[in-house]
Amino acid sequence: MTIFGVNHLACVYAKRANRRPLLSSSLFLFPKLSKDDVRIPRPRHDTIAAMAPQTAEQIIADISAPPPVGAPHAVPIPGSERANRTPVFRHWRFRDQPLLTKLEPEVESVHDLLELAIQKYGPRKALGVRKWNPATQAHENKFEWMTYAEMGERRKNLGAGIVDVVQQAGYTNSKYGVGIWSPNTPEWHLVDMACTSQSLFSVSLYETLGPDTTEYIINHAELPVVACTASHIPVLLKLASRVPTLKVIISLDPLDKGEHKDKNPGNILREIAAQSGLKLYEIQQLEEIGLKTGRGFRPPTWDDLTTINYTSGTTGPPKGVVMKQGNAVAAINGARSMGNVQANDIHMSYLPLAHIYGRMIDQLALVSGAAVGFFRGDVLGLVDDLKLLKPTSFPSVPRLFNRFNSAIKAATVEAPGFKGALSRHVIDVKKGYMRQPPGSTTNTHFFYDRLWTKKVRAAVGLDNARSMISGSAQLDPDVQEFLGAAFGNEFRQGYGMTETYAGATVQLARDYSAGNLGPPLPCIELCLESVPDYNYSVDDKPNPRGEVLMRGPTLFQGYHKNDEENQKVLEADGWFHSGDIGEIDSLGRLRIIDRKKNVLKLAQGEYISPERIENVYLGNTNILATAYVHGDSKESSLVAIFGIDPENFPPFASKALGRAVAVGDTAAIKAAANEPKVKAAVLKVLDKIGRSHKFNNWERVRNVHLVIDPFTPDNGLLTPTLKLKRPQAGKAFRADIDRMYEEVKATEEPSKFKL
C-alpha cells in the first residue's frame, strides 16, 4: 500500500524577505514559492509566519475581506512557470504568504477543533431533529435539540465504549476504522466524533450501497466495526462469513421495543449475530459501557488518519481516498477563513454525510458554534423542513438549485398577467445591478426586496439565508444569475473534490458574476497543464486552458491499496492531476469547461463536452429531470436520453398532444413520452435553449428518447452520489441510441453531390 504522507505535499520554501507578513504567527502554514529556489524540499505543517499573534476571528476577518476593486482574486506566483503549465495561482492574500493550515496554534486534529467549540459553546444548540410521532404518523412541527455540552459528553462515552467492546472482541490493533452506514442523523456525527476522540478513523458507506460494494469496502478497509441503522443490520449479518475483520455491529436505532423476549427483534438479531461470531450493540449501550470505563480521550495527531472516504466511482470498484487529520483541519480552516459561517448561524444537514462535501459543511458549522438541524430524510419534504428551521446559509448542489430555478421561474417570470410582468421587471432591474462595473455591483434593491424577494425566499424556507453556495458540479451561469437576483443574497459557486477534502476554490464575497468558481482557497494552490490531445493549451487566448492540477495541505494521501492509481494522478512534488479541464480568467478565477475522460470527438473532428450540454439543458427547463447526451465517433450529431419530470412533463405533453395527460398516470405519461409530437416539442425547447447559449451546430441534440427515471442507483446507472455512469448508460441504451441515429439520418436531406 502506498500512502503519500504530508511530507509529500511539497511546496517550495522561499528565502525570507525582510518585510512584515500580512498574517499572524498563530497561522501554521505551507511555505511560499520563490523563483530563487532550485530544489523543492518537503514542507512541514508547522511553518510559522513571524508576527504578533491574532485571534482566529481577526485572521478570518483579514482573509475574508474582498480585494481592492478590479484587483485579481488569485495571483500567479512569479517564477513558478513550467513547460506546458501556467504559473502557480494562489488566493490573493497569499502571494507572499505560506498556505493556510491552522487558525489556532494548539490545534492538531478535528478532535481539537471540536473540543474548542464544545468548551466555548456548551449550552448552545448543536444537533436538532424533528421527531416522528407514531400517533399522528407525522414528524413533529418543531426541532428538538442536543446542546454542545451534551454532544461532547455522548461523543466521549461512545468513543470509550467502542474501544472497550472491540478490545473484548479480541481485536488487537489500536488504530482501526469504524464504518458508518446511515443517512444524515445526529448519531452519524456522534460516531464520527467518537472515532476521532480515540484516534480511530471513520469510513462512510452510502445509504444506497448494495451488498457487493458494502462487502468490498469492509474488506478493503479491514473494518472491525460498522455503525448502522437497523435496516442495514440484516445485510451485514448475511455478509458475516465474507467479511472476516468485522467483529462488532452498532445499531444507531433502538432494537428492543417491549415485545416478549422470544419475539423481540433485538434479541433475534443478537442471536443471529452471535451465531456468526459478531457482537451487536445499541448505541446507548455503548455510551453506558464507555461511561463506566472512565476512559479518557486519546487525541489524534496531525498525521493520524481521520477517514478513508470511498468515491462512488463511475467505473470499476470504489477508490478509498485516504485523509489525515491535518488534511481535514486545513480544509475546514480554509472554509472558515471565507468568513461565511458565524456562531449564531443555523444550518440544515441534508447533503449526504457519506459525501465529503456534506461532511465538511457540517463539520464547518459545528466547529464554528452553529446549530445543525437534520432534514427528515425525504428530499420531497426538504422545503417543509427548511420552512421550519429557517437556516441562515444554504450550501447545496446544482441538481436542487436547478429545481428551485424552474419552480420559481414558473411561479414568477413565466406567470401570466401583472404578476409575470412585475416579476420580469424586478429580475431585469436586479440583473442590471449585478452587471454593473466592479465596485458598483449588488443584487439587492431597497424596495423590490421587501415587495417581491421576501416572498420568493419564504416560499422555499430561505427567509433568513444570508448566503448560498453551489458545489459538487458546475452550475449553469443563467441559473446562478437568476437565483442570485431572485433571492438577493450572497450566492457563490465553489469547486473541489473528495481528494481535496471537498474545498478547492470558491467565489469571494460580493462577486456577483456567474459562470466562474472563484480563486483557490487559502489552503490550496493550482495551475493548469496543456492537454494537446483535446486542443486545450495554456497558451490559448483570451484565457489559458488545461487540466487542473492542485497542491496543498488539504490534498489526500493517496488511494488506499491502489499504487497504480496513485502513480497516475500524484506527482512526486505533490501535484494532483484532477482530470478536470479548466480555464483561469483575468482575475484568477477558475472555470471548469470539461472533464478529461468525458470529452467526445464526433465524426467531423469536433470535440464535445456532454456534461456541459446536459447542465445547460437541465438548468433551463423544468420538463426534464436527468440527462445523458451521447455522441459516437462515427456520427456527426448528438442524441440524448432524458428522464422526464413527473410533475411538469404531463402538462407540457398535454399541450403538445391536445389531450389531457394526468400527473400520476404512469401509463399515460409513458405513452405520451413516445409520441412524435411530444418529442418534436421537446426538441424545439432544446433548440431554443441551445441558441440562447450560443451552442455550435454540432453541440445541439438532434433526437431524444424520453423515459421515466432512466438513471437510478438501483439500476446501476447512477453512483450513490447521483453521478451518471456514462459507459454503463451508453451500453444500457445502445438499442435506443442506434434507433435515434437511424431516425436522424432518415430526416436529413440527401446529398446534392452526384457522381
Image: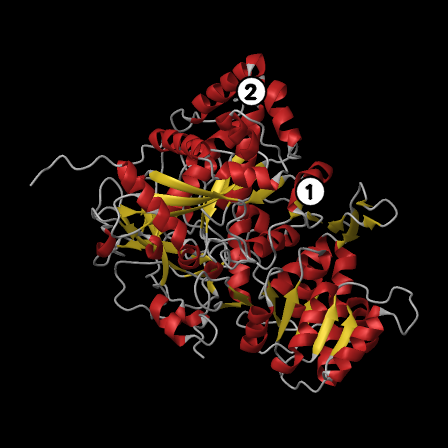
Q: CA distance from mark 1 to mark 2?
A: 25 Å
In the rendered structure, find residue 323 and report the number of the disc placed on it.
none
Q: In the image, what residue type sits under mark 1?
A: Gly
Label 1 belongs to which residue?
Answer: 381
Kindly check if marks 1 and 2 are in contact, taking CB atoms under 8 A apart as contact: no
Of residues 55 and 167, the one nearer the viewer is 167
Residue positioned 65% across, 66% down in the render: 180
Q: How many numbered marks does the figure carry? A: 2
Is residue 641 placed above or below 565 in the rendered structure?
above
Q: Quadrant of the N terminus?
A: bottom left
Name which of mark 1 and mark 2 comes first in the sequence: 1
Mark 1, Cα crowd under 10 Å, few <14 / some 14-19 / many 20+, is few
Task: Residue 186 in the image: state x and y as whole percent.
Answer: 72, 57
Q: Which percent across, then down, holds residue 746?
A: 28, 40
Where does label 2 land, which residue? 415
The image shows residue 693, relative to residue 171, as above or below, that is above
Q: Residue at x 33, y 61 (%)?
A: 14
Residue ranking furthest to the top: 418
* Residue in front for this viewpoint, 354 or 716: 716
Element type where label 2 sits in the image: loop
In what element is the residue under mark 1? Answer: helix
**Disc 2: CA contacts within 10 A as few (<14), some (14-19) or many (>=20):** some
In the rendering, at what x and y percent does residue 355 appear? 56, 57
Q: What sort of colour scheme is used for the picture?
A: secondary structure
Residue 23 appears in the rendering: yes
Q: Is residue 8 left or right of residue 465?
A: left
